[in-house]
Amino acid sequence: MALTLYNTLGRKLQIFESIRQNEVGFYGCGPTVYNYAHIGNLRAYLTHDILVRTLQRRGYTVTHVMNITDVGHLSGDNDSGDDKMVKSAEERGKTVLEIADFYTKAFFNDTGRMNIICPTVVCKATEHIQEMIALITRIEANGFTYSAGGNLYFDITKFSSYGELALLNLEDRKPGARIEVDENKKNPYDFVLWFTKSKFENQALVWESPWGRGYPGWHIECSAMSIKYLGEQFDIHAGGIDHITIHHTNEIAQSEAATKKHPWVNYWVHNEFLILDKGKMSKSTGSFLTLQTLIDDGYDALDYRYFLLGGHYRSQLQFSYEALDGARNARKSLGDRIRVLAEKTGNLPSNEGALPDSVTQGKAGTYLEAFNKAMDEDLNTPRALAELWGLLRDGSVQSTDALQTAFEMDRILGLELFARAAAEAEKRLDTDRGSPEEIAEIEALIAERTEAKKAKDFTTADRIRNTLKERGILLEDGPKGAVWRRI
Ligand code: AMP
Ligand code: ZN
């Protein structure tokens, strides 16, 4: 069965075909590192993660590129407002680079805790200024720019398919009304490629360029870095739906204006928003929840992952603590079922391998097939989760097959159900072995015996062995030292 993805470009489900056989070039817009990521942002990165895992399951080698925006992103995506990085640095009494460094680390700490796979390439805007200048030079040479008020602008009237992704009706948007007027722009949709004399005279980071000392507009970084790492045409580009109208629309215009190749990207994947009871979450107004808030409230980062998987990435998802409680209980319950099966079979799968015939040709295989089909149909995680539940609830599936199949499913869902079950089982084993004090005493005796053996004091070593045996504890010497169990 083929993989279908909903392509925002054209607004339809399409069968995915990669440009190069068995390889996928994927670019996902990364964070602007002026603050912590909020839990809505993390929905975007989870969507990227699920997409990458699905592509990998289908045998593709994925080059996943993510940018880190550490310069040039204004509070309005249409070049209006303050520079987010500069404002955050001023508010916190730090340099822009200190702020960027701190929040980049915080970002990867969050994604790591949510078991979101790290991209193949993570690239910072400030480390790719020369690539941006080179791309703007090509755009300029091809006649798509004009200078005004010290800034270099992209002239959208020169790019005939401008707004195709967002289905923009260019007549709709007249200057004034809700849009901040930049009198240098010939058209309100025009956007800045390079700032020099702008309202941010205090811009902390500036670079020499053919258009003067200044800094890049926000959109150019994604074009420059994706082209550098993925080539002039690549397979998939992703981000939140808020990026369709301005950011991604402008990325397309710049990239195709520079390379004269169309389409720049074949598939555009956009995730819907996570919303709070109160409405929209916003990083710039500070009204947002972070992963750490949820952890401080007693949840596991993977409970939040489960919660997100319960919604399809193209549907709006409403966050509530009640729903998160539900996710936590569900994840725990799945983990418990796996542990019980593992205890029954005496085995917990821990790495990938070819599935046995009993799975592929038996009942477990039908669940796995349905699971894969759900993921292949535009990443339908709620349906995939339902298949996992079905499998683990179905008493007619052989325990070993159920375990092996659930393991395969969790490699895509990334809920760490098996690691959790293993940890639980270990904890139980420890409680079966005795109280913490008793275990410490036994281990101290074993250490004493090991020392005695090293000193060739076999009388003491034997005495300790016999003392333990009288207490019902059997010692077995192995390559990693002595292990003990109760008899
Ligand atoms: P930013 O750091 O603001 O550039 O946003 C990072 C990513 O999060 C982008 O892909 C946004 O489209 C996405 N995003 C922002 N807010 C939300 C939200 N509430 N729900 C889902 N995705 C979001
Ligand atoms: Zn971007």
Image (cartoon, rainbow, N blue to C red):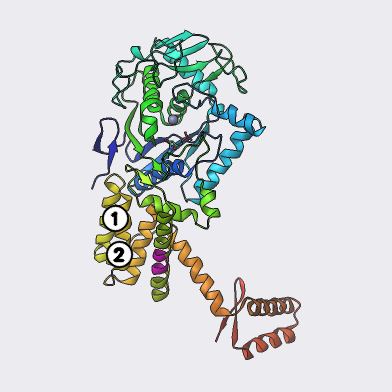
Q: Amino acid at mark 1?
A: Phe
Q: Is residue 414 visible?
A: no
Mark 2 packing: few (<14 Cα in 10 Å), some, or many (20+)?
many
CB under 8 Å between callouts 1 and 2? yes
Above or below — where is 227 with respect to 355? Answer: above
Q: Amino acid at mark 2?
A: Leu
The answer to whether 371 appears left or right of 414 in the picture is: left
Q: Position of residue 31 (x, y in %)?
A: 49, 36
Q: Is label 1 in a helix, a strand or a loop?
A: helix
- Under circle 2, the secondary element is helix
Q: Quadrant of residue 399?
A: bottom left
Quadrant for residue 90, please give it.
Answer: top right
- Residue 463 vertical placement versus 107 (above, below): below
Residue 391 disc label? 2
Q: What is the distance, in whole Å, between disc 1 and disc 2 at their CAs?
A: 10 Å
Q: Which residue is mark 1?
A: 371
Q: Along the horizontal axis of the image, is 43 left or right of 149?
A: left
Q: Judge whether residue 313 is colored magenta.
A: no
Q: Position of residue 431 (x, y in %)?
A: 55, 76
For the record, the magenta segment spans 333-338
x and y percentages locating residue 167 in the rendered image:
28, 25
Which badge, 1 or 2, comes first in the chain's sequence?
A: 1
Q: Camera-side residue: 460 or 288?
A: 288
